[in-house]
Image: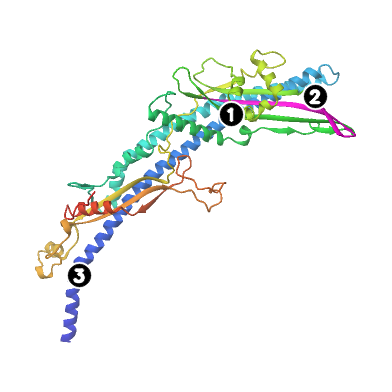
Amino acid sequence: MPMTLLFIGAVLLAMWVLYDTGALLSDRMRLQNTADHVAYSTAGLVARDLNFIAYTNRAMAANQVGIAQMVGLSAWAASMDQFARNANTIGQFIPGINAITGSVSTAAATNRQIIDQAAAVVIPINDQVIGLLSDVQRLFHQSIVLQLSSFSADIGRRNDPDARSVMAAGDYSLAEAASLLAEWNEQIGQQNTLQAIGSDDADAQLANRRFREFEQVVIDSRDPFSANRSYQWDAPFSATWGVGLEIRTRTPKFGGTDFIRDVDPGDSTYRWDWAAMDTVSQYVQFCVDVVVGEECWDLPEIPLAWGAAHALDESRSGVTRFDYHFSHRAGDPQRWGDGAWRNRTAASALLTSESPNPISGDHVHNRVASIRGLQPFHALLDDTPRNRGPAVIALYIKDEDRIASQRQLLAASGGEIVDDLDARATGGLAGGRAGAVAKAEVYFMRPTDLDGWRRADNRVEYGNLYNPFWQVRLVDLSDTEKLTASAIVSDGAVARPEG
């Protein structure tokens, strides 16, 4: 029995002595969890900001495509109206046919009118939504900036009310959560706004370059109808008749909607117009078999239909005409209107509508709405491919008197502990406090193993603000950051790192 009591006493004494050590380890773990949570959650707020920018940039591009669709529909309806009128012009000389062509022409004109009226309503709505998305993007970012400091403080308080954030001591300092704004501005900056063309200012040149890139994103985002309305009309417009002496016809239809960049003469900034063009022509070829092979003769192009429509920048107040011929000369004629100029006679007939007449119709004046082009938006400033965004470091400390100990327990009940049984009497914490540090960074990674998410070309995609694949991860601190954190926690008790 005495041995048993002696053994129990030894165990209780060991537990008594180890209590302080266990309490310290528990508080250190809690402190580390607090630092991890603050760093990760604060970086998560930044990732949410970047993903929101990507969503709104995509939404602005989608609404631009919505404008392109309506302009394309108007041009297509105009070309069908022109085709019906051309057919009716011929049909008037054919008894029994004139009534049919007249009815078709009336229906086509009504259809065009309905589409143009719809475009006049829908396009301004799309344009207003683009402006609203631009404003919301800016306001959301500003709200995130205002939340950063209080958000990180609240996370720390909820995880450990006795812990406090100390990011600097003497000559040692680490970036606070709120200072993410400086790194954010270094990588993303403020919303890009249009600057005067030809400016020598590097920031202005960068902003205009980003607008040109956004322009290309919009162009690449066009739906198939807007980007390419080109195909060949089937029989009877495209067919082969006869044997020996063959008559071959083909009737290609070319059309597309383009985002045209120009310069505003008022302030020398970019402006954008949506313009669409559609042409249809028939090509007839006579071919006959001869002894040495086949001989063929081509008839001149027969224009069947042509049409155009546009939504012009609002700076062109009072202007209805769009210079399709200038746009043709300024660019690749095989690309403009998805090759609408390949039907050259039909395209030339469209240009005669500069002075509307019963034959050519009125197309170059077919302005269906006003738009404001590209609105301010955020984009990455650095041209160097990168997948890492802003990072945040969280450093939390807890004073020794805030960590539970046997001395505190006994003092609370009016007692005291002898120094021989006090684990902290002969050697406490460096600087009288415990500390923990964590670092989290925002990074971009587009999944490559999930259907519907990976790129169609299977290429690796670098960080950008057009796709919302920004995520958060905890990362190791650099050696300098670790030494700096140790110095702050111990209040300068460790040597300052060189360099």
Q: Nearer the viewer, mark 2 or mark 1?
A: 2
- Judged by depth in the image, the label closer to the viewer, 1 or 3, is 1
Q: List the residue tagged with mark 3.
A: 18
Label 2 Cα crowd, 10 Å radius (few <14 / some 14-19 / many 20+):
few
Q: Earlier in the sequence, mark 2 or mark 3?
A: 3
Q: What distance separates the C-alpha of mark 2 from that of mark 1? A: 31 Å
Q: Quadrant of residue 191?
A: top left
Which of label 2 and label 3 is nearer to you? 2
Judge the density around disc 1: few (<14), some (14-19), many (≥20) Cα neighbours within 10 Å.
many
Image x and y of residue 371, in percent:
52, 24
Type of residue at label 1?
Asp
Could you say whether the residue bearing mark 2 is in a helix, strand or loop?
A: loop
Q: Identify residue for label 1.
A: 258
Residue 115 included in the magenta stretch of the image: no
At label 3, counting other C-alpha atoms closer than 10 Å, the crowd grade (few under 14, some 14-19, many 20 or more) is some
Which callout, 2 or 1, points at the residue further toward the start of the chain? 1
User: What is the distance, in whole Å, between disc 1 and disc 3 at their CAs?
Assistant: 77 Å
Does residue 491 sit above or below 223 in this rendering? below
Viewer-nearest residue: 229 or 296: 296
Q: Is residue 61 left or right of residue 115?
A: left
Residue 311's place in the image compared with 151, above or below, is above
Closer to the N terminus: mark 1 or mark 3?
3
Residue labelled with disc 2: 299
Residue type (three-letter) at the residue carrying disc 3: Leu
Classify 230 as above or below 473.
Answer: above
For the image shown, how many numbered marks are present on the structure? 3
Q: Which residues are magenta?
A: 272-298
Cβ–Cβ under 8 Å for marks 2 and 3: no
Q: Is residue 295 magenta?
A: yes
Q: Is residue 19 visible?
A: yes
* Residue 402 percent coordinates (x, y): 18, 57
* Residue 247 x %, y %: 85, 30
